[in-house]
Image (cartoon, rainbow, N blue to C red):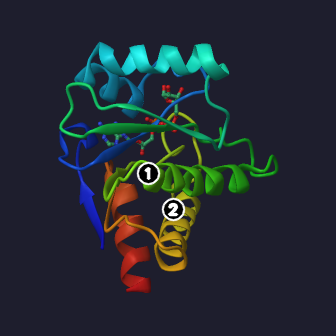
Amino acid sequence: MIQLIQGDITTLEVDAIVNAANTSLLGGGGVDGAIHKAGGKAILEDCMKIRNQRGGCGVGEAVITTGGNLKCRYVIHTVGPVWNGGTHNEEDKLRNCYKNLLILADANGVTSIAIPNISTGIYNYPKDLACRIAVDEVTKYLLGKKSKINKVLFVCFDEVNYENYMIELRRLF
Ligand code: AR6
């Protein structure tokens, strides 16, 4: 099941929420700042361990930590591409975010997951293009693999993203 909601991802009761992080995994603004603020220091401690093990998280990759004080068991951190005109493999990198976060979720027994609009804030990816990629990758993954994920929430914070997702999901379903 795919659901669309508008709101703050840090309040949701799901197995995992996804963070739009940066390669340092040390926190930042936007949804990243909100997740670390609401989730507390246990999330940052796990991020530091991952930094020590593998030096952070590459663009398009995903890593998993505790959900700390949040209502979710896990936070899956992925790093979207910075939009740079569209000629720097931004699309492949954004597709990789969705592919890898879903694979990592399944590998950890996650059955419900909430995903924000990766790269569409500070990283400036055009919202309409990012929306199509997100919906395409999630639907392909749920249809194509023996996934145990049975609930995906697309969580939009701003009105433009919400409208884009509404149109795209209505077009498909
Ligand atoms: N819940 C859900 N979505 C949110 C929330 C929230 N609480 N807050 C913002 N958004 P951004 P990026 C939406 O900038 O573009 C950070 O500093 C927001 O409206 O959070 O991938 C990281 O550390 C937008 O649509 O992430 C990186 O340095 C979407 O989340 C950098 O920003 C993504 O916006 C990553 O930039």
Label 2 Cα neighbours within 10 Å, binned few <14 / some 14-19 / many ≥20: many
Q: Residue furthest right?
A: 87
Q: Which residue is mark 1?
A: 105
| Residue 124: % across, % down | 57, 41
Which residue occupies the foreground of this view, 102 or 36?
102
Dot 1: element: helix
Q: Quadrant of the N terminus?
A: bottom left
Residue that appears at 20% across and 25% down = 69
Quarter of the image where one finds residue 153: bottom left
Kind of residue sitting beneath label 1: Ala
Quarter of the rendered structure image containing ligand 1: top left
In the picture, measured across the screen, residue 26 lies left or right of residue 39, that is right
As drawn, the label of residue 74 is: none
Q: Nearer the viewer, mark 1 or mark 2?
A: 1
Which residue occupies the foreground of this view, 121 or 80?
80
Answer whether residue 50 is visible to the viewer in this image.
yes
Query: Circles 1 and 2: CB distance less than 8 Å?
Result: no
Earlier sequence position, callout 1 versus callout 2: 1
Q: Quadrant of the C terminus?
A: bottom left
Check the image and report above or below for 133 versus 51: below
Q: Which residue is mark 2?
A: 134
Check the image and report above or below for 119 versus 126: above
Dot 2: element: helix
Answer whether residue 26 is visible to the viewer in this image.
no
Label 1 Cα neighbours within 10 Å, binned few <14 / some 14-19 / many ≥20: many
Residue that appears at 18% across and 40% down = 11
In the picture, measured across the screen, residue 145 lies left or right of residue 57, that is left
Kind of residue sitting beneath label 2: Ala
